[in-house]
Image (tube, rainbow, N blue to C red):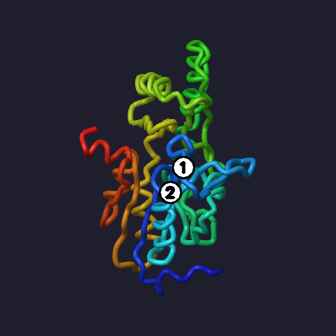
Amino acid sequence: MTPTPPEADPRPLVFLDLDDTLFQTRRKNATAPHVAAVDRAGQPLSFMTDAQAMLAAWLSVAARVVPTTGRNSEALNRVGLGFSQGAICSFGGLIRRADGTPDPEWQARMAARSADHAKALHMLDALLGVYLEMEGLDIRHRVIADAGLDLYLSVKHNAAAWEDLETVANWLRAEVPAGWRVHLNGNNLAVLPPFLDKAHAVRWFRDRIAGPHPFAIGLGDSFSDVEFLLACDIAALPAGAQLAQRLAGG
């Protein structure tokens, strides 16, 4: 089905984080019944609760949903929810138009910035590998690329031992160059060069791609989502999310 042209669509934009906002793994919720995403082998990996499934169904009708995610485009393609309005991937490193192609001007900007930071990113990945071997930690790590660009470092514990991952996060905070960010939420640890920013990508999408629209809503769960939520007119977050726990003083 061809997406409705933006200028003819009065529905609000919803910039929607995915993991731990619209769905989660079994480790986060063992009873969620609805499959939302699969792994590289095509096996169910992420699941929605009944409430999340109802939210997804409502948004698909009521809004122009733009996934705004740390997933790269290949991982986003494994989400089976039929997004058709474009997407922001890799923490803002890639903006996809409704036809799935990269926005060319944004891509050129990111290519220049990726080239400036790629060497430091791979050196940090190598240094992390030495540290993990010395500490005997069962943790996998790799540089995440999207549309041919090296963008950020992803780190996950193979047994989801979050306390070990917190130790690694603290080590990384002491090692990263100035201006880099270390983001930890559950078993997802990401090291982001300073040019990666969901908020900048949201503003670009609103100004250059979306066309006329009345307002934008941001929906996310984690500390790394705060700035992109504030780039929208209305911000929302799931109960029990990392941000909600901080607001509640947890």
For the residue pair 111 and 94, the one nearer the viewer reads as 94
Query: Mark 2 or mark 1, which is nearer to you?
Result: 1
Q: Provide residue 236's location: percent of width, then percent of height.
A: 34, 60
C-alpha gap between disc 2 and disc 1: 8 Å
Residue 11 drawn above or below residue 52: below
Q: Amino acid at mark 2?
A: Thr
Residue located 52% across and 49% down the image:
24
Q: Which residue is mark 1?
A: 31
Q: Secondary structure at mark 1?
A: loop
Task: Write the residue at 56% across / 50% down.
Answer: 71
Is residue 43 toward the left or the right of residue 144 in the image?
right
- Residue 49: assigned label: 2
Which of the two labelled residues, at mark 2 and mark 1, occupies the earlier sequence position?
Answer: 1
- State the image coordinates of residue 52 (x, y, percent, origin top left): 48, 61
Q: Is residue 215 above or below residue 87?
A: below
Quarter of the picture holding the C terminus: top left
Query: CB of mark 2 within 8 Å of CB of mark 1?
Result: yes
Q: Amino acid at mark 1?
A: Thr
Using a 10 Å C-alpha cutoff, classify the residue at mark 2 as few (fewer than 14 neighbours), some (14 to 19) or many (20 or more): some
Q: Secondary structure at mark 2?
A: loop
Q: Residues within 10 Å of mark 1 (few under 14, many from 20)?
A: few
